[in-house]
Amino acid sequence: MKLYLWLFVLIVSACKSSLPPDAAVISGSISGSDGQFIYLEKLTVGDLIRIDSTLVDEEGTFEFSYLPSEAGFFLLKLESGDFITLVLDKGNHLELFVDTSTFPDDYKISGNLDSELLQNYFTQTAKNQGILDSLSSVFRGSTHLGNFYQIKLGLDSAFIELFAEQQKFTRQTINDNPNSLACLLLINQRFASKTLLTAETDFDLMQQVDSSLSLLYLGNMHIIVHHERLAKVLELRQQQLDTEARLAPGQPAPNLNLPDPSGKQISLNSLQGKYVLINFWASYSPPCRAANIQLKEIYEKYNPLGLEVYAASFDHNRKIWTDVIEMENLEWINVSDLQGMASPIRKLYNLSEDLPYYYLIGRDSKIILKTGKLSELEKGIKEQF
């Protein structure tokens, strides 16, 4: 019997010693899941790949060994589908301690700082998620109440505060750990189905992570993708700056040549010598329809003095567009290519979907001002007359 035991120990020891020196080992205990499978999955840039699986023994213990080609993100997943995310690199030895009654909201992991950072982040996030679930429960249980509107206002305020707290926690975690590969995962986190950080609002933070990790993890696929993403943002920013410079006050207004309801092409350049208010609008938009009421007052006041309105619509339904023009007696120049928001005019004039938007053009066809506010527009027109 002692001989068999000695042989078993020798075999196990030989197996462990046969692992490559760069092999990573993940072991631990999962109480309450003996006899079940646990899976190791690799999170690549665009896919999730199952690497291995093993049974949790009667004592709740398990062990994986794997030789990663580079540092990356991995999932440890139970049969229930619950999982945790960890960072694994060559030579890492991670230990995981889990109680299935609290998993994955609460667990303990040790072995590398990146995985410990993720554990701290997701544990705190689970607490905030619990608060969010409570808010959602109150919302669902209050829809039939007479004071639901007041309750909703309070819940909305609480959600905004909770979301801001999660944002602050995420930013602080990244800012405190710019050399951690885990930051790449945190940058892309969502909370309540909303993106926490964006390249537009948190570019400097993302660039800080990129600069730090590019030196530490040369050629890592996750960092390469992050770097390429930021490069695209920089490119778009430059394009935006170029566009803003092209459309700045004092610059020539790009010409428009669009058909009116009868099909006649009317060119913006044909109005040179007049002050022209370009009204970018859509007949299906309530804010645009409301603004047209005030715009008619401006038109009636300043048209006799030399102001023309060139209303370029982002409609796609000819009948609705022409019916609104007739019904609301919009007597200025009305034009549209009926391509909706897919119209090339949108890019030409750098317009968002937030309509209406106005450009005031001088007699020399140069831009005087651009704004989405009628008050600013009317002030600008008054200054010209």
Image (spheres, rainbow, N blue to C red):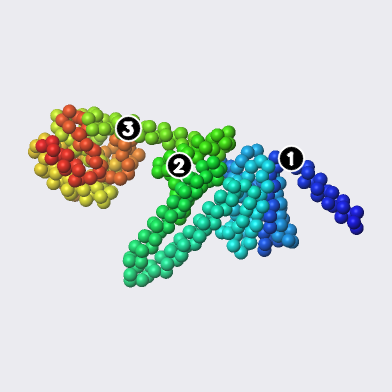
Q: Tell me, yes or no, whether the two marked residues, 3 and 1, touch with CB atoms within 8 Å.
A: no
Q: Earlier in the sequence, mark 1 or mark 2?
A: 1
Q: Residue at x 57, y 53 (%)?
A: 119
**Image quadrant where residue 299 sits:** top left
Residue that numbered label 1 is attached to:
20
Q: Secondary structure at mark 1?
A: loop
Q: Which dot marks residue 243?
A: 3
Query: Residue 365: image x %, image y %?
Result: 20, 29
Distance from disc 1 to disc 2, alpha carbons, whole Å, reads 37 Å
Q: Which dot marks residue 205?
A: 2
Q: Residue at x 74, y 61 (%)?
A: 58
Residue 209 lies, with reference to residue 36, above or below; the image says: above
Between tags 3 and 2, which lies in front?
Answer: 2
Q: Earlier in the sequence, mark 3 or mark 1?
A: 1
Between tags 3 and 1, which lies in front?
Answer: 1
Q: Residues within 10 Å of mark 3 (few under 14, many from 20)?
A: some
The C terminus appears in which quarter of the rendering? top left
The three-letter code of the residue at mark 3 reads Thr
Residue 299 lies, with reference to residue 241, above or below; the image says: below
The three-letter code of the residue at mark 1 reads Pro
